[in-house]
Image: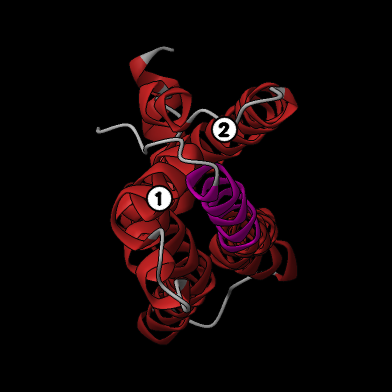
Amino acid sequence: MSTGLIASLYSKIGPVGVALVFLSLASTYLALKNIALMSLINRDFRRQFALIESDSEFCADKLYKSNNPIIGIIAEILRTHAHSSDIRAEVAYLFHRNFVRIMRDITWLKLISVIAPLLGLLGTMFGMTTIFRELAAGTGGASASMLADGIWVALLTTIMGMVIAIPTLVAFYWLSLKIKDFHMEAIEHSYRAVERFRYADSHDISMPQK
């Protein structure tokens, strides 16, 4: 991209527009990275846990050897709360610890979805202020086409902000719902694993150590 083209773009969008471009890049990176990561985690969890549960003898060692974060939560529950009546609080703590990076990225997506339209509106206000200042300093000979062009440039940042905010908000809610699904999966399968372990324990099958 030539220097002249960059200068032309900068003259249209200004510093606020540049900030919005960086926000769009950050939003795209965070959304795509976490959507791909959570899809892989979900697919890997279902495949691994189905194999573990299909064994005629429930083996907790296989849970401990897995690098899947949801299975890691279940393994930790078995190791520390196998005989507890309520494991929901421990699952919530372990879930937060295992998914803290994803949850932080989701929070950033929420922040970007809020900041982007506000920055766009700020850019528009700066643009309109510049137009009216130039009109006030002139001799009153401004044409309608000049005013229309100036207002279009001023409104451009608002359009950019909305274009960034809408898909970012969609990604935020999709990832938030997926996180809630993972949390419920962790609770449900932890109870199922504990039941399987208690059954094995009642038949004198000792619990393996981590």
Disc 2 or 1, which lies upstream in sequence?
A: 2
Magenta segment includes 198: yes
Give the SS element for disc 1.
helix
Give the SS element for disc 2.
helix
Frontmost residue, 103 versus 135: 103
Report the disc number at residue 137.
none
Please give the residue where the numbered disc 1 appears in the rendered image.
78
> Mark 2 belongs to which amino acid?
Ile
Residue 31 appears in the picture as rendered: yes
Residue 163, by quadrant, is bottom right
Q: Quadrant of the C terminus?
A: top left
Q: Where is 114 relative to 2, above or below?
A: below
Residue at figure coordinates x 61%, y 47% from the top left: 196
Q: CB under 8 Å between callouts 2 and 1?
A: no
Q: How many marks?
A: 2
What is the magenta segment's predominant secondary structure?
helix
Residue 161 located left or right of residue 148: left
Magenta segment includes 31: no
Residue at figure coordinates x 60%, y 49% from the top left: 199
> Mark 1 belongs to which amino acid?
Leu
Residue at figure coordinates x 41%, y 87% from the top left: 136
Count neighbours of disc 2 (C-alpha within 10 A) and say few if under 14, some if 14 to 19, many if 20 or more: some
Image coords of residue 29 (percent x, y)? 47, 35
Image coords of residue 167 (percent x, y)? 68, 54
Q: Where is 182 relative to 42, above or below?
A: below
Mark pair 2, 1: CA separation: 20 Å
Magenta span of residues: 187-202
Report the disc number at residue 41.
2
Query: Which is in the foreground here, disc 2 or disc 1?
Result: 1
Image coords of residue 54 (percent x, y)? 74, 25
Residue at figure coordinates x 65%, y 60% from the top left: 188
Frontmost residue, 92 versus 14: 92
